[in-house]
Amino acid sequence: MIKEDIRNFLPADVPEEMEKSFLENFEKTTNGSGRLMLFAGDQKVEHLNNDFYGPDIPGEDNDPEHLFRIAKAAKIGVFATQFGLISRYARDYKDVPYLVKLNSKTNLVPYDAKDPYSQQWFDVEDVVRFRDSSGLDIRGVGYTVYLGGEHEHSMLREAARIVHEAHLRGMLAVLWMYPKGPFVKNQHDPHLIAGAAGVAACLGADFAKVKVPYDQEGAFVPELLREATTAAGRTGVLCEGGSKMDEEAFLRELHEQIHIGGSRGNGTGRNIHQRPLEEAVKMADAIYAITCENKGVKEALEILNK
């Protein structure tokens, strides 16, 4: 049964005949909370193998199937990764809720050397055909926008079309909103992050994944996130998970992002998959508990310590 307040998140460009599909996708994905726990698995392109092989990274993380094993066993809203990776593994992981990332680029060219451009790989219609032919639980699409460079106009146009086309098919649309390039001096500037969140709202996104805002000393202050979550309006703000850190510190920061900063979820990859399977599943479950089940840090830590 779809909760009445979930309709508050229904965009006007969802056709009447697709409203039920969109609301069901939103309800299942957020557990009726309006918050999204996004398990990010798109880094094999974005960061090449740096996030999957090396010191303090378990050997099993080098195998792409590790991501799917986690997504199957853990509580998540969606598992976000590239179309091709899903196609290689999804026959064995049909019950995983997927979000297809429609663009990606490597980090080989420094951002201060050339303005980044991450061109769209697939259309929303490609994803819809894939969903319908495979029977997979594909609930939405994602796309990264790099603001601040000479190519932003192309990415903004692609993003706007993707969001609208996703809504026309009753699917969710999540935008990664990252100002980057030689004109961006501080990616963690709270005012800049708020601007990026506002752009996501203008593009019609359901959720926007952004950098964590830092103060002048480089520390996270949850109150600084308020500018971004207010600027985003009805678009939910998700903070990126970032590099792997202490579990308790991560969960406390996540709780503050939601309950002080006003975010509506998280987009976490390395802090989950850079752990052995059992630990990764517990970490994902703890993140989900805070994000979508409104649990406190103490209850989340109990999940980790089972």
Image (cartoon, rainbow, N blue to C red):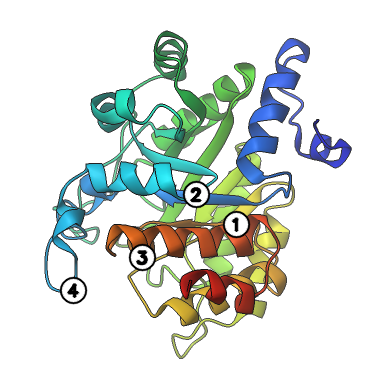
* Amino acid type of the residue tagged 3 in the rendering: Glu
- Do labels 2 and 1 touch, CB within 8 Å? yes
Of mark 1 and mark 4, the one earlier in the sequence is 4
Crowding at mark 1 (Cα within 10 Å: few <14, some 14-19, many 20+): many
Q: Which residue is mark 1?
A: 265
Crowding at mark 2 (Cα within 10 Å: few <14, some 14-19, many 20+): many
**In the rendered image, which quarter is residue 92 located in?**
top left
Q: Find residue 240 and report its horizontal and vertical position in percent.
A: 46, 61
Of mark 2 and mark 1, the one earlier in the sequence is 2
Q: Which residue is mark 3?
A: 279
* Residue at screen point 20% across, 55% down: 61
Crowding at mark 3 (Cα within 10 Å: few <14, some 14-19, many 20+): some
Q: Secondary structure at mark 4?
A: loop
Nearer the camera: disc 3 or disc 1: 3
Of mark 3 and mark 4, the one earlier in the sequence is 4
Q: Secondary structure at mark 1?
A: strand
Q: Is residue 206 left or right of residue 272?
A: right
Q: Find residue 32 and report its horizontal and vertical position in percent.
A: 73, 44
| Residue 142 in view | yes
Residue at mark 4 to residue at mark 2: CA–CA distance? 23 Å
Of mark 2 and mark 3, the one earlier in the sequence is 2
- Quarter in which the N terminus is drawn: top right
Of 280 and 113, which appears nearest the observer? 280
* Amino acid type of the residue tagged 1 in the rendering: Gly
* Residue at screen point 28% across, 50% down: 43
Q: Secondary structure at mark 3?
A: helix
Q: Which residue is mark 2?
A: 38
